[in-house]
Image (cartoon, rainbow, N blue to C red):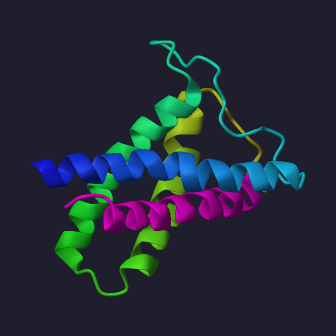
């Protein structure tokens, strides 16, 4: 049980230290129009957006590590990057964005996928970094 708490914490922290930092760099480079560490309230609970994202980062870390436990930990860095980059990005684009009413033109899909892949792959790698440094 304690292991899973630390896995959640690792995914939570990876949002702040990897995902949001990468978003800040992309924002500074003019690639994305929105800044990192968004404190705008989310619906329905009014939690700051970045905290909500970190919470879901913790939940996704549980899923990712459960999957990695089943398929093996060889090349764990690559598997974590691919899990974050592909799975999280597809869920965001195909489920989360439509639920939030954030539609987009299909012509935008490749660009959004690439940006999402970068951010979420870094989250996956960051989660593994924190799993390695946090107590076991």
In the image, farthest residue toward the right: 30
Query: For the stretch drawn in magenta, what is the main secondary structure?
Result: helix
User: Where residue 115 appears, x then y in whole percent?
Assistant: 70, 58
Can you tell which quarter of the image residue 118 is in?
bottom right
Q: Which residues are magenta?
A: 108-136
- Residue 126: say if magenta: yes
Residue 11 visible within the image: yes
**Taking 59 as reference, is 115 above or below it?**
below
Residue 127 occupies quadrant: bottom left
- Closer to the camera, 93 or 15? 15
Instruction: State whether residue 17 is above or below residue 75.
Output: above
Q: Residue at x 41, y 40 (%)?
A: 56
Q: Residue furthest left?
A: 1
The answer to which of 64 and 106 lies nearer the viewer is 64
Residue 51, above or below 22: above
How many discs appear?
Answer: 0
Residue at position x 43%, y 78% in the image: 77
Residue occupying the point 17% across, 55% down: 3
Residue 126, horizontal then vertical, whole percent:
48, 62
In the figure, is residue 37 to the left or right of 44?
Answer: right
Residue 95 is situated, as x and y percent measured from the top left of the image, at 49, 41
The answer to which image quadrant residue 39 occupies is: top right
Let me know if residue 25 is in the magenta part: no
Q: Point out the image quarter for the C terminus.
A: bottom left
Image location of residue 1, percent across then percent down: 9, 48
Q: Is residue 108 visible?
A: no
Q: Is residue 26 above or below residue 54?
A: below
Residue at 48% x, 30% y: name it. 52
């Amino acid at each position: 049980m304690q292991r899973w708490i630390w896995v959640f914490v690792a995914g939570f922290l990876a949002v702040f230290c990897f995902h949001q930092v990468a978003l800040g760099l992309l924002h500074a480079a003019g690639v994305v129009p929105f800044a990192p560490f968004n404190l705008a309230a989310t619906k329905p609970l009014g939690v700051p957006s970045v905290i909500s994202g970190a919470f879901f980062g913790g939940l996704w870390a549980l899923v990712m590590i459960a999957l990695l436990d089943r398929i093996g930990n060889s090349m764990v860095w690559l598997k974590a990057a691919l899990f974050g980059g592909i799975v999280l990005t597809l869920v965001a684009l195909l489920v989360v964005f439509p639920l939030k009413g954030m539609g987009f033109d299909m012509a935008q899909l490749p660009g959004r996928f690439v940006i999402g892949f970068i951010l979420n792959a870094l989250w996956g790698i960051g989660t593994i970094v924190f799993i390695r440094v946090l107590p076991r």
